Amino acid sequence: MSYENTFGTYEPRLVLKHFYEISQIPRGSGNMERISHTILQWAQNLGLEAELDAVNNVFVRKPASRGREQHPAVALQAHMDMVCEKTDGSTHDFTKDPLHLLFTDGEVIRAKDTTLGGDDGIGVAMIMAILEDTTLAHPPLEAIFTVDEETDMKGAQNFDCQKLTAKKLINLDIGAIAVAGNGETEFRMHIPRLQTPVKAGSRQLSLKVCGLQGGHSGAKAIEERGNAITLLNWLLLKLARFTSYQLISFQGGAGNSSSFARTAEAVIAVSPENESFISQLCEEQLKNYKLELEDRDPDVQISLAPAGSPEAYALSEKTADTLRTLLLLLPDGLVSLNKKWPGLIETTANVGVVETRQEELYVTMLARSFLEHRRHLLIGKAKRLCSLLQIHGQVDHDIAHWDYRIQDEFLTLVKKEYPEFSIRIGQGTCELGVFTDKKEDLEVVALSCPHYKEHSPEEYMLRSDVVSSYNSLLRLLSQL
């Protein structure tokens, strides 16, 4: 495939060209070196001032267009990494394979069997197009391409804001006019993996909850979608009430707390005579889940099948019970709605990952809130639960929310050029809380092309949105 074969002559050509090219470079969080060096070299080849910092952020300066040299500089910012989710049957390797982009009817842009990386590849591509195009009218520009936004925001945390001369920063990561946004805290828990031999004569079965939409655990929290981890745990707890089994392993989520778990799988060992009863109980529980999620996750499924390679050891009963109790009592789901911004969340939590590792069981929970004390209250609950269960837990990262930091004059220009967008607060967590903490005189706003079903393999964008958003950004820059 090539850019021409994928997008042909459709506009905006420079934006689509750069989006295609960065989609050929693996750029999952933590795998940033290649994409960072590629953008650095590309900018330097254009004759622009560009530099790479110690964590692989790229910072580029472009002089003002003719006649605007004395205008105040404006900063543009986007993150290079993407969430790596794929369909259950996909063999895609996010560490080395390019994305296979699909473009249908001159409008819909998606990737075959994987996330598209529109979050935030389209922001990166728009900035690259602006830096390359010498025909545009704009003030001096300072472009910031950050790493690892989807995990711990290491890029923004380590960026030296003293390099910025700009007093206005436009973040290209939210499909709205976002003037404030939620903070987030990730909490990681570790349960020692104590084991016991699998009972002789047992059948080993794979028990899976799947078919869920998944998606962004902040932006889609208002929809209260299903979480495969908590649904599977409910099933395991119900099984334990009516029959005996040994829990061998539990895997859920795709390694990223910012997404709802679409799939979770447990391997259990049971007596052969109990297998039909377990199958019947799974059918009954699926009816309950279908009823509960009919308007939110109607395709939820429960599968029961023979496990793959048989295991010699299961988790000890104490380890299994600790895991089930932890997953039952951890905060998960929508906690409260925002009273000042109707239809938006205030506080939410997501149990995002469960992994059975060689020596431990690993669990993560991500708390988001526009109110710092509410976010830390959820983390406090998780800490107290860990203390009661005598397991280790610690905060991995703590990202501040971002308060309203935009003057009326700037916001008026934004509203004029983006009439299709309403003013709102960001439901996910972007890097602006980090930048505003570091630079107190910085005005900030988040704008971008919308991307749909982000953080899931169904993610897509519309070319018409790309055209509209890019043209609005160009007009805004010309006004600044």
Image (cartoon, helix red, strand yellow):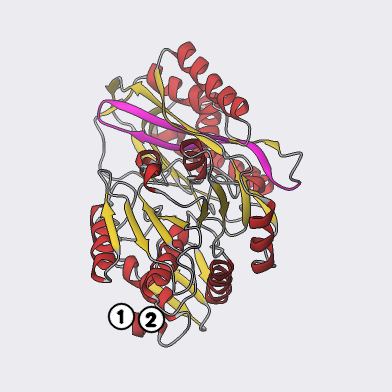
Q: Could you say where residue 240 lies in the image, as x and y percent from the top left?
A: 50, 26
* Horizontal relation, residue 470 to residue 347: left or right: left
Q: Amino acid at mark 1?
A: Ser
Residue indicated by mark 1: 2
At 65% from the left edge and 50% from the top edge, which residue is drawn?
Answer: 407
Instruction: Tell me the residue at 38%/66% (across/down).
Output: 63
Q: Is residue 427 visible?
A: yes
Is 309 on the left-hand or right-hand side of 10? left
The residue drawn where x is 76% and y is 41% is 340
Residue 50 placement (x, y as % from top left) = 28, 59
Report if residue 352 lies within the magenta region.
Answer: yes
Would you say 404 lies left or right of 457 here? Answer: right
Residue 445: image location, x then y, percent:
58, 52
Label total for image: 2
Give, as a single range, the part of the protein colored magenta.
342-368
- Given residues 245 and 201, the one toward you in this image is 245
